[in-house]
Amino acid sequence: MGEIKVSPDYNWFRSTVPLKKIIVDDDDSKVWSLYDAGPKSIRCPLIFLPPVSGTADVFFQQILALTGWGYRVIALQYPVYWDHLEFCDGFRKLLDHLQLDKVHLFGASLGGFLAQKFAEYAYKSPRVQSLILCNAFSDTSIFNQTWTANSFWLMPAFMLKKIVLGNFASGPVDPEMADGIDFMVDRLESLGQSELASRLTLNCQNSYVEPHKIRDIPVTIMDVFDQSALSTEAKEEMYKLYPNARRAHLKTGGNFPYLCRSAEVNLYIQIHLLQFHGTRYAAIDPSMVSAEELEVQKVNLHISSEPEEQ
């Protein structure tokens, strides 16, 4: 039990990548926690947004692998925000503080919903270059909890944890998935009442994504074919919302494929980011990209932009 927490990879990550704490709001209690790894010269990094139960370190396997390949990666943990607009304002201030004009976002579950809401919020002055949406949803009504969203702040921590744990896989799972669930339960235990209550409020507060505001953003939808907290209807809704999105399907992986199927997830992330190599929105150090790969990418870019030039 708890294999990930004592694994050499996790311990190496914790000992080499510092956790930074940043305050960007007038309220000093609103603290963003983040890991920023990879070359700081990259001005359009990939930012990871966790699910309700997750902390910034749930993406440690992506951080280790992607930075090893030359990418700049930031994984973060949200302060206590009680509505989507407040979150978007805070996230915009964080990007300003980090001096990042545009970013790629990888959002898992609630993180995926917030990534879409931020892209929608900033559509007049775009800050999001692309989206990778992992087990994400586009409408909070799928959880049938919009009526309780305003009472989460009253509930004690143990009750909130019980609500979150109710969405974790309960049947037989393979050892990697079991380790992933154990790790997420451990991360969940580290969250305080207000952190959990605010995330559940954001997860269930009546809201949906307006696709016409973000239709020009390249999207990859990543989901799993086995059991997860997302219904088939919710997945179908995402496909309808983004008809031109690339699809990255994992045969198995449950709610947390980035932990238990990290090699596949990392590969799909690389494939998604490949389209930006050789542009100012590349999330990778140019010296880590081969000349042949750049040539192929330039040809692809030329082909995709030709119709607009006519």
Image (cartoon, rainbow, N blue to C red):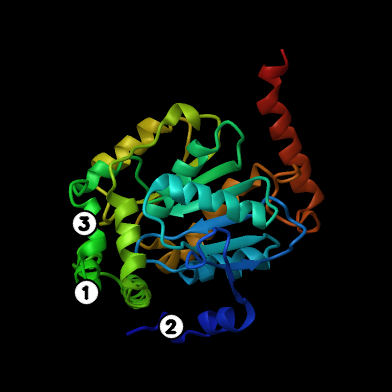
Residue holding disc 2: 5
Q: Residue at x 43, y 54 (%)?
A: 111
Q: Circle 3 — which element?
A: helix
Disc 1 or disc 2, which is closer to the eye? Answer: 1
The CA distance from mark 1 to mark 2 is 22 Å
**Between discs 3 and 2, the one toward the N terminus:** 2
Residue holding disc 1: 158
The CA distance from mark 1 to mark 3 is 15 Å
Give the image location of residue 302, x and y in percent: 73, 29
Give the image location of residue 42, x and y in percent: 73, 55
Residue neighbourhood size for the residue with mark 3, other residues' Cα within 10 Å, grouped as few (<14), some (14–19), many (≥20): few
Looking at the image, residue 82 sits to the left or right of residue 16; the answer is left
Quarter holding the N terminus is bottom left
Residue neighbourhood size for the residue with mark 2, other residues' Cα within 10 Å, grouped as few (<14), some (14–19), many (≥20): some
Kind of residue at badge 1: Phe
Quarter holding the C terminus is top right
Residue 151 figure quarter? bottom left
Of the pair 148 and 162, the residue shown nearer to us: 148
Q: Which residue is drawn at 51% across and 40% down?
A: 119
Looking at the image, residue 285 sits to the left or right of residue 122; the answer is right
Residue 127 figure quarter? top right
Cβ atoms at labels 1 and 3 below 8 Å apart: no
Kind of residue at badge 3: Ser
Looking at the image, residue 229 sits to the left or right of residue 303; the answer is left
Give the image location of residue 143, x and y in percent: 22, 48
Of the pair 156 and 42, the residue shown nearer to us: 156
The CA distance from mark 3 to mark 2 is 33 Å
Residue holding disc 3: 151
